[in-house]
Image (cartoon, rainbow, N blue to C red):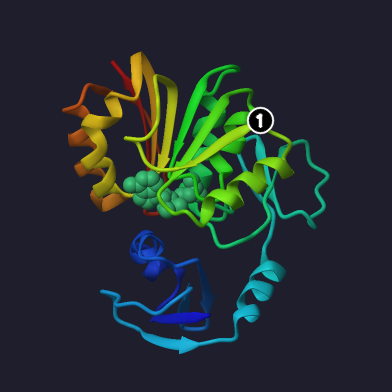
Amino acid sequence: MHVFRLRGDFETVDIYSAALFDLGARGLEEKPGEVWAYFPERRELPFPGEWLELPDTDWLEAYKRDLKPVVAGPFVVLAPWHGWSGEEKRILLEPGMAFGTGHHETTRMALEALAERVEPDMRVLDLGTGSGILAIGAAMLGAQAVGVDIDPAVIPQASENAKLNQVKVSFDLGSLDDVEGPFDLVVANLYAELHAYFAPKYRGLFGICGTLILSGILLEREALVREALEASAFALLARRQEGEWVCLIYAAR
Ligand SMILES: C[S@@+](CC[C@H](N)C(=O)[O-])C[C@H]1O[C@@H](n2cnc3c(N)ncnc32)[C@H](O)[C@@H]1O
């Protein structure tokens, strides 16, 4: 396993975290005075830091050991070995290499927004599904959920996670040009620039109306997304913020 060490803590490195995951990072871990980004292979990175080599198994074992249950709205996200006595709906995830354990603000806010908007039998698309967590959450709320991702490595993991939770979700390799709408609700935890680029295409995923939940937006790039969405026939319904991260909920009109 290859580790890229960045100076700082989760808070100072947070501005890079979405970009690190997009460039192939499989996990981030805070150490005293630094943050370790785990990569399956070395690559050029546009951030200040240095590479370190680790035996493959160490980080995954340490990561699993330190993983804690996370509550998000009516859900709790658990690893299969966690106990939980609360009333929350349990999303079980086998921690693997895919993004989406519920520990990131962007995933938690998207789950909370889904819980407020999903109704039984809605057709829901999870664009950039990672571990499948959002599609699985939607299916638990009674939706017919579909998840797509451009990373072939995550599709089997998302399918395994759906089985673990005994929900039916179809996961496919691809992106928004590969899905067949219309959907009643689309959730996408990506990043601001991609939401702005996709804005005109998002409208084509819906029929007459629908709900679009956009997460993964850094506060400083919120205006970019809002301008693009408002120019593409979407009306802002609600906004969530946790720290530097924003989640925008739109109505297609
Ligand atoms: C931040 S993770 C979100 C994972 C999960 N949905 C969550 O909320 O935790 C973003 C995911 O989007 C995928 N992705 C990035 N660009 C994409 C694109 N253009 N189309 C589809 N998926 C994409 C990545 O491979 C990654 O799995």
Position above or below: 206 against 246: above
Considering depth in this image, is 234 or 72 the residue closer to the camera?
234
The residue at the point 57 percent across, 24 percent down is 144
Location of residue 235 by image quarter: top left
Considering every residue shown, the one lying at the far top of the view is: 208
Q: Is mark 1 within 8 Å of ligand 1?
A: no
Q: Is residue 11 visible?
A: yes
**Position of residue 7 measured from the top left corner of the image (x, y, whole percent):** 39, 82
Residue bearing the label numbered 1: 140
Kindly state the secondary structure of the residue where label 1 is placed.
helix
**Position of residue 153 measured from the top left corner of the image (x, y, whole percent):** 51, 57
The residue at the point 34 percent across, 25 percent down is 205
Quarter of the image with the C terminus in it = top left
Please give left or right for residue 180 compared with residue 46 in the image: right
Position above or below: 68 against 75: below
**Position of residue 115 measured from the top left corner of the image (x, y, whole percent):** 57, 30
Residue type, label 1: Met
Position above or below: 46 against 236: below
The residue at the point 46 percent across, 31 percent down is 125
Q: Is residue 217 visible?
A: no
Location of residue 44 by image quarter: bottom left
Location of residue 140 by image quarter: top right
